[in-house]
Image: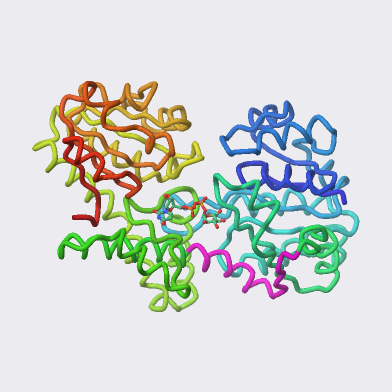
């Protein structure tokens, strides 16, 4: 089918490349001229495993192109996927929907023939209904232009894999024609056994924020338990392992540590709280404020632990391993690792950061920190090493790599991913959140 992808950031670029791989003809529209030029040359402006190869392959095959023209987009596509960002507003917890609104306005004016506009962006419940009304008002083709809501659940680091093998397809529709076209479009995935839920707009919008709210709650639950573990001498890793064997609970997203960050979970739970307030169900969602508080508290706890370990932050030399909000990503949006590094620096520590992929993005966000060329370089004369993003390469570093590099043999594991016993046996002081 001939489809367009509106907004070619992390979500849109992945969707565009993955749908070309499924056999569709894809035209992406991207307003940022620098990004558009990179994409047109088959280059991906972000680090995402597998995406660069897939995108360059389909740019070369001619199945994937990019433009900045709404008229061309409207003329080309039968299906238009809306993949623009919905960041948190600067002045409140709410989601900023300006990109969604301007995309609908920009596209609708050119829709002179039947088409389905498919929202994939994460939006507050009620947005789809509002956008459907705008489309009907503006589009010259009137009721032949349909809206559907089809939330995206892909994870950074696994975006290609999640797009090619989604664990479910959710379609919010109000018209059987939209469902028919989308079932045809996703035919290869549905034939491969992907479950599909066809529902109304509101449910489709809610599934996405509810999923992220649940995941955030699970992480904050185990981090709250980590605080209890510290007060009692219990071990949060053994606790999580034991809880995880209960199939009703499961071990995933029970990894205690410095908490969640990124461009999705934090802003989505805040936007959800805000929207719940508008809908008069604030009390029902107020627990998400605690989820956010527990999450933010982890960052402060690490600063306190670091201070206690070095005996005063002013002038202390601290190595920080990791800047990305999670491994296999160069994304530093709301990254707990970078936020901790910044807080330590503001309190007078000399912080040297190393991330295998995110040094450059981190430097843009936090130019005043020092960025090292390797994990070992970051540790030169360090009084303390902080492991804050669990890249596999950090787990491969053993005490003997660092014994003669650091000034003091102290390490803190903010992700509960290192072998603390091995470090202690080698004579290091090793600590973690929620562990004796
Ligand atoms: C999240 C969701 O997992 C995706 O399903 C969703 O599609 C996406 O948001 C989105 O809304 O677009 P992502 O932001 O890529 O995906 O990252 P996650 O893998 O969910 O991790 C989020 C944060 O939680 C990371 O900072 C990670 O380090 C942290 N985390 C995760 C923990 O601290 N503990 C855990 O056990 C798991």
Q: Residue at x 43, y 39 (%)?
A: 391
- Does the magenta portion include 365? no
Q: In which quarter of the image is residue 307?
A: top left
Q: Nearer the viewer, residue 128 or 196?
A: 196
Q: Identify the magenta region.
A: 193-212
Report x, y in % for residue 283: 38, 78
Q: Which of 346 and 423 is in front in this view?
A: 423
Q: Which residue is drawn at 83% across and 61% down?
A: 187
Question: Seen in the image, is 83 located left or right of residue 70?
Answer: left
Q: Which of 248 and 303 is in front in this view?
A: 248
- Does the magenta portion include 200? yes
Counting labels gives 0
Secondary structure mostly seen in magenta is: helix
Q: Residue at x 70, y 32 (%)?
A: 39
Question: Seen in the image, is 434 located left or right of residue 295?
Answer: left
Q: In which quarter of the image is residue 241?
A: bottom left
Q: Which residue is drawn at 28% across and 44% down?
A: 413
Q: Quadrant location of the C terminus?
A: bottom left
Q: 278 above or below 215?
A: below
Q: Which of 39 and 396 is in front in this view?
A: 396
Report x, y in % for residue 186: 79, 59
Question: Seen in the image, is 67 located left or right of residue 428?
Answer: right
Report x, y in % for residue 20: 79, 44
Report x, y in % for residue 276: 46, 72
């Amino acid at each position: 089918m001939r489809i367009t992808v509106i907004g070619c950031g992390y979500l849109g670029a992945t969707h565009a490349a993955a749908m070309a791989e499924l056999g569709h003809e894809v035209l992406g529209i991207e307003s940022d001229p620098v990004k558009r030029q990179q994409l047109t040359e088959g280059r991906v402006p972000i680090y995402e495993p597998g995406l660069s190869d897939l995108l360059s392959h389909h740019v070369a095959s001619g199945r994937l192109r990019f433009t900045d023209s709404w008229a061309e987009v409207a003329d080309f596509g039968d299906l238009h996927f809306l993949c623009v960002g919905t960041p948190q507003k600067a002045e409140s917890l709410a989601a900023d929907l300006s990109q969604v609104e301007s995309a609908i306005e920009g596209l609708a004016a050119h829709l002179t023939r039947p088409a389905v506009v498919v929202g994939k962006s994460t939006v507050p419940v009620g947005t789809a209904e509002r956008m459907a009304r705008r489309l009907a008002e503006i589009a010259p083709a009137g009721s032949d232009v349909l809206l559907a809501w089809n939330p995206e659940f892909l994870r950074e680091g696994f975006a290609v894999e999640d797009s090619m093998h989604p664990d479910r397809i959710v379609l919010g529709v109000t018209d059987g024609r939209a469902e028919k076209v989308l079932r045809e479009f996703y035919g290869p995935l549905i034939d491969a056994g992907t479950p599909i839920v066809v529902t109304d707009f509101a449910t489709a919008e809610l599934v996405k924020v509810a999923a992220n709210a649940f995941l955030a709650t699970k992480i904050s639950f185990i981090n709250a338990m980590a605080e209890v573990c510290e007060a009692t001498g219990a071990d949060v890793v053994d606790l999580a392992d034991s809880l995880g064997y209960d199939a009703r609970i499961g071990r995933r997203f029970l990894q205690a540590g410095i908490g969640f960050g990124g461009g999705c979970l934090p802003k989505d739970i805040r936007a959800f709280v805000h929207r719940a307030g508008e809908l008069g169900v604030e009390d029902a969602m107020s627990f998400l404020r605690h989820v956010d508080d527990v999450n933010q508290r982890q960052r402060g706890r690490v600063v306190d632990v670091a201070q206690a370990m070095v005996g005063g932050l002013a002038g202390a030399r601290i190595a920080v391993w990791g800047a990305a909000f999670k491994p296999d990503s160069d994304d530093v949006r709301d990254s707990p690792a970078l936020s901790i590094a910044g807080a330590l620096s503001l309190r007078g520590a000399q912080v040297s950061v190393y991330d295998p992929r995110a040094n450059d993005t981190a430097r843009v966000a936090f130019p005043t920190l020092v960025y090292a060329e390797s994990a070992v370089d970051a540790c030169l004369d360090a009084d303390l090493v902080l492991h804050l993003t669990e890249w596999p390469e950090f787990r491969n570093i053993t005490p003997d790599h660092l014994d003669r590099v650091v000034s003091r043999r102290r390490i803190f594991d903010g992700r509960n991913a290192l072998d603390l016993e091995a470090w202690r046996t080698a004579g290091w002081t090793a600590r973690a959140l929620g562990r004796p």
